Amino acid sequence: MINRSAPVFIAGHRGLVGSALVRRLTADGFTDVQTVGRKDLDLRDQAAVDAWFEVQQPRYVFLVAGTVGGVYANSIRPAEFLYDNLMIHGTVVQAAHRIGVKKLLYLGSSCIYPRHADQPITEEALLSGPLEPTNEGYALAKIAGIKLCETYRRQYGDDFISAMPTNLYGPGDNFDLEGGHVVPALMRRFHEARLAGEDSVAVWGTGTARREFLHVDDLADACLHLMDHYSAAGHINVGTGIDLTIRELAEAIRDLVYPGVKLEFDSSKPDGMPRKVLDVSRLSEMGWSASTPLVEGLTATYDWFLEAGRRGDLRL
């Protein structure tokens, strides 16, 4: 188990995952959680990152920072998604190696897997076929991050591990209608339609694509579990192992936010991969499984959205 009193750096603490990790580590008794904002440290700048690590001397690192977004954002900003994430992964891993960090967890994404991978997707599916074109740039950066951790482990003996989560949602998410992921974008769209009294809500895609969704607090718990119990080269899938169609997801959010409103599917927008659900048997065998049912998680997320809106703290 990692030392709860040692300095632990969360790279990306203001994001969806990073903020969940701050909550989880604080609840678990960690006494020295290190964070730094973008204004004070550009994680794409190797010299700046090296200097920060030299001064702060973290012993453990959760590398969850990155440029992220939904299908639409990925499709219109591929260069940004590729460049930013390549640089962030590279600078933090190198700095961690340079000062001798005891352990690092790198967080990737399930988009690393081929578009037509067998379902549920096992860890062995990596690099077995062409990627989904709509998020290829992001996926390539995430694959590079996995390989970076593996090569530093192989060449230098660094205890750098990788975890690949499925689609995430929860408090602290980005509710931007174009840049956000599907759950917060839909939640905001239904919310605004209800306030405006609209009789229908547009849902991007055909509604037939199948996806798996994991509450971010469950992911934070899984990350800590892996840091405590896993030290090997191969990456580990993190998810629920349960999927549903985007239509079913939209209906669940509609029933929560604006019951009875009509759904209008916009087939001119991309669906992305036809299906994406992870095989989580390896993590299950390590004694961890998700504990937040989807409807319960969606309800808590919408409650957070309403409260954050009242405070003026939403990411829009």
Image (cartoon, rainbow, N blue to C red):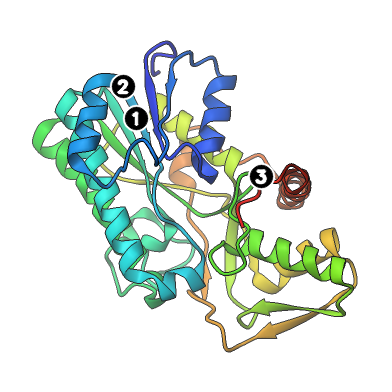
For the residue labelled by badge 3, is the local secondary structure a helix, a strand or a loop?
loop
Real-space CA distance between mark 1 and mark 2, rounded to the nearest whole angstrom: 7 Å
Give whichever of discs 2 and 3 has the lower sequence position: 2
User: Left or right: where does residue 51 sit relative to residue 36?
Assistant: left
User: Left or right: where does residue 130 sit relative to residue 13?
Assistant: left
Q: Which quadrant of the figure has residue 133?
A: bottom left
Which residue is nearer to you in this view: 177 or 278? 177
- Residue with the mark numbered 1: 61
Residue 261: x %, y % from top left: 86, 74
- Residue with the mark numbered 3: 313
Name the residue: 31% across, 32% down: 104
Q: Which mark is residue 58?
A: 2
**Amino acid carrying mark 1 in the image:** Val
Name the residue: 86% across, 67% down: 194
Real-space CA distance between mark 1 and mark 3, rounded to the nearest whole angstrom: 27 Å
Residue 250: x %, y % from top left: 73, 69
User: Left or right: where does residue 262 sit relative to residue 83?
Assistant: right
Disc count in the image? Answer: 3
Question: Is any part of residue 178 visible from this angle?
Answer: yes
